[in-house]
Image (cartoon, helix red, strand yellow):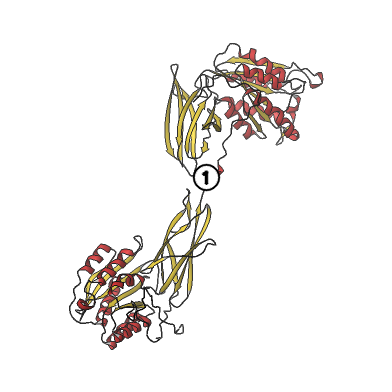
Amino acid sequence: MRSVLFVALAVVFLGCTSSPDKAFMEPGPRLPTYIPEADLKVEIHTPSGDLFLTNSETWIDIEGGASIFGGVRYLDLALVLDSSKSLRRTDPRDRRSAGAIGLVESLPASSDIQISVVDFDSNGKLVLPLTQDRAAVAQAIRGLNQLGRTNLAAGIRTALEEFERNARPDSTRAILLFTDGKSNDKKARRAMQEARDQGVAINTLLLGSDEQGAAILQELAAGTGASFVHVTDPRKLPEAFLNLRTTGVDRVTLRVNDSAPIPAHLVGGTFSGRVPLKQGENHIVAMATSLDQRTEESSIIITVGAPGCGELEVSATSGGQPALSISERAVAIVFDASNSMWGQMNGQPKISVAKKILQDAIDWFPDDLTLALRVYGHRSPRDMRDCSDSELLVPFGKANQQQVREAMSELRPRGQTPLAFSLSQLADDFGDFQGERAVVLVTDGIESCGGDPVAAARALREREIAVHVIGFGLGNAVDEDTASLAAIAQASGGRFFTASSAEELRDALAVTVGTPFRVFRGEDVVASGALGSGEPLLLPEGRYRVRLDSAPPQEVLVTLSREQRVTLTFERQAGSVSRSEQRYPTQYTPCEEAAPDPEPELPDEAPAPANQISF
């Protein structure tokens, strides 16, 4: 058994003046205060458990319960209200009812509280059994009369009987006893002992200046570990009801991480408050302090993520089937079969890896894509230094994927890397084709014949032909080779990728074969992609302009929202192009993880893209 602790009774001063008639009377002599064997408990109820927020909330409301009398999930509260006829004199405006109703209305709406109403004068009467219907509680309080004498014991026992019938297991059970006069002390003490045996706290509130009445009410509260408040001015009753510490808890504070404590609003054993949040992890602690100055804590973690991104998918169909373009499109694949392609990648020759990936990729090229294959370095041995070793193995044509696949299967790396010469042949390869034209160059090295591939790429740009370069397995010379190959792509208005694995080569092919598009926010390019690449772009919420570099170009405005995917589809039918937009909810992805692929910078001397339109 815990030893009995003597402490000064907690008396809440709601206001005072310099005159002898104070709003509250001074506490009487110190009484032995019963300390319940149950430990102080505190629990945050809302939010329940640790929480992850997917937006930029800056504040959150915290609610919970605290008690020394039992569980904190449920509170069963009995309002035991004096209705003796003396109240006609001491409380002519019935501020008793206003105070009790104000207490009920101040309880958090989400808190799980049952309330009963007991009316006592000469006898005790259960006016309303325990209920969660707070409107019914208020109505019952308004209907109380003012007759008879004051019998504290009758009111307490009526409340205890109702607890026995309808209180919930593991709930905190508390009585809020209001009176304006004295009663039979012996009977009241016996009722107090019964309450203590049942683990019920009797919180007492006295209106008036009756010293004997104050003494017995102090004793009832102290004997059950509860609080006592003495009000002489009936105008203070509404505030006094709110400030009774019905569950033996004096105060609750909230803090976030290392912030200063924030006082919570404590009423009826429940507490509530609002705390600030910051992006990242917020460790929120509720600390309860009992009337005898014990403390206990409860905590939750709320993590605030970066604002969620929206997803943008740009696709095309032709004749109802997925397409890589909405206009006629010709793609020339220029493949490196120079001697260096015998180099190893993950235990295999690079030529074997590249051939397999390209052959597999051809399977998903649509039949309406006009395709060609040019290869260099495959005819003459390296020591012959044949700088014209470049051949159009498969001329442009539709539905010729099988021809390209068979031609690649026969390739054996042998010679030099005549990039400039190969690029200079492409204009003739395309012939008089009038639609979109692009080159996909797959190479593991730079020019080896002294040519100027950047100048050749710039010449192709003047003919509206972009060269997309995939640097495959560049090895130890990655920095030098990357800069040289990137310059070729930049000079032609194309895109540059490095691929050090089969997966990266497959991904690079997916975003170079289809018609490219760019995403603008204002005048800035914030992302780019290609039709058929499959992966949606992750972008912050906002308004964007999508430009499809088809022939002629297409532009459309689109608005993105958080955690929503927008699929923008261009459809080609009978020589015309239509657009449609569909929206779907999507999973949260923080924008800080989004890495849009920006438009590559072009050299200053490169000419502007052809067919550019203003918006």
Most foreground residue, 483 or 407 = 483
Residue farthest to the right, as pictured: 383
**Horizontal and vertical percent position of residue 488:** 68, 25
Tally the marks. 1
Most foreground residue, 468 or 270 = 270
Residue farthest to the front, as pictured: 18
Give the residue drawn at x 39%, y 87%.
29
Question: In this image, 554 relative to 460: left or right?
Answer: left
Give the quadrant of residue 171: bottom left
Give the residue drawn at x 44%, y 68%.
252
Give the quadrant of residue 423: top right
Q: Which residue is mark 1?
A: 590
Location of the N terminus by quadrant is bottom left
| Disc 1 packing (10 Å; few <14; some 14–19; many ≥20) | many
Give the quadrant of residue 407: top right
Callout 1 secondary element: loop
| 595 up-or-down from 153: above or below | above
| 339 up-or-down from 144: above or below | above
Most foreground residue, 10 or 113 = 10
Residue 435 at least partly seen: yes
Question: In this image, 390 relative to 385: left or right?
Answer: left
**Horizontal and vertical percent position of residue 609:** 58, 21
Give the residue drawn at x 58%, y 11%.
432
Question: In this image, 67 relative to 342: left or right?
Answer: left
**Horizontal and vertical percent position of residue 514:** 55, 25
Residue 443 at least partly seen: no
Residue farthest to the top, as pictured: 432
Residue type beneath disc 1: Pro
